[in-house]
Amino acid sequence: MPTVRPATAADLPGVRAVAARFGNLWPSRPDHLDRELETGRLWVGERGGLVVGFGGTTARGALTHLADLFVLPEHQSSGVGQALLARLLPAGAPRITFASSDPRAIALYTRLGLLPRCPLLYLRGVPGALPPPPAPARPATAAAVADLDAQAAGGARPADLAWYAALPGVTAHRARDGYAFARALPDAVLIGPAGGATAPDCAAAVLAALAAHRELPSARLTVFGPNPLLPLLLGHGFTITDVDLCAASVADPLPYDRYLPHPDLG
Ligand SMILES: CC(C)(COP(=O)(O)OP(=O)(O)OC[C@H]1O[C@@H](n2cnc3c(N)ncnc32)[C@H](O)[C@@H]1OP(=O)(O)O)[C@@H](O)C(=O)NCCC(=O)NCCS
């Protein structure tokens, strides 16, 4: 049996080595792994004293979001993922994750009660190719959008939003009754989390945040299948780079048509 235990700071190089094998490292620190460690939500799986896998969660109110689960290819299918999940996902509480196309992931989640619910599409495109937003972006603070986020994301996480907003290049935008976080990276803007009181409010905020970064050559965002932004973005040259499956222990964990998650923070 693998050893599974909460991660310590000394485990981070091993955790990052696993994440790097899957291209799941941010370009700069602090990153989502630092945050999961800081909040006590990062666990490692060991064999022979070596970190061979890790998993991490975030919390939005009572909702637990499984944000990371990775096992080194040479140690997959030997029980590490299952052992990590047993510690990461509290039974009896609402749980959600974005499952990769790995059949082992979907099988493990389904057996723990997180049923496949909705496709989540990862999109990339040129922000300058989009039509003008229906309303301009207004700068906002993380605190000012925390309530809107709580209503759209399935639960409150003001401390996580404040942490993210303090990172270099991150800005929060408001437009109509919507909000959108944007992170300007050297070659792209990353949108999310974003949402709104209604689907048009959500779309207005996302388009406003994209317009505010139209000087960047590329934009990345994640959109659930029922979101009306999906046909609009695909109709303006955005392409699908990956597809995950939102799996959750409750039928409607969040409103798919008016919430865009951050790919790693949920
Ligand atoms: C997905 C992942 C984390 C699972 O961890 P793991 O240590 O390989 O998985 P485990 O050995 O604990 O369990 C795998 C289970 O899937 C089952 N399984 C394998 N292939 C399956 C299939 N095609 N259909 C249904 N079940 C399947 C196995 O039977 C096993 O269950 P069992 O041990 O009860 O028999 C790991 O394989 C991984 O890192 N994959 C690549 C990265 C990834 O996609 N991560 C998920 C992000 S959401």
Image: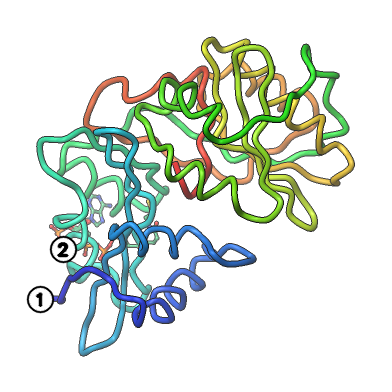
Q: Secondary structure at mark 1?
A: loop
Q: List the residue tagged with mark 2.
A: 83
Q: Is 183 placed above or below 251 here?
A: below
Q: Amino acid at mark 1?
A: Met
Q: Position of residue 181 (x, y in %)?
A: 62, 36
Q: List the residue tagged with mark 1.
A: 1
Q: Is 200 placed above or below 18 here?
A: above
| Label 2 CB less than 8 angstroms from ligand 1 | yes
Q: Position of residue 4 (x, y in %)?
A: 17, 71
Q: Please report the residue visible at 46 percent of the width from the left and 69 percent of the height from the top.
A: 19
Quadrant of the rendered image holding ligand 1:
bottom left
Q: Are marks 1 and 2 in contact (CB under 8 Å)?
A: yes
In the rendered view of the protein, which quadrant contains the N terminus? Answer: bottom left
| 179 lies left or right of 225 | right
| 262 lies left or right of 50 | right
Q: Please report the residue visible at 36 percent of the width from the left and 26 percent of the height from the top.
A: 154
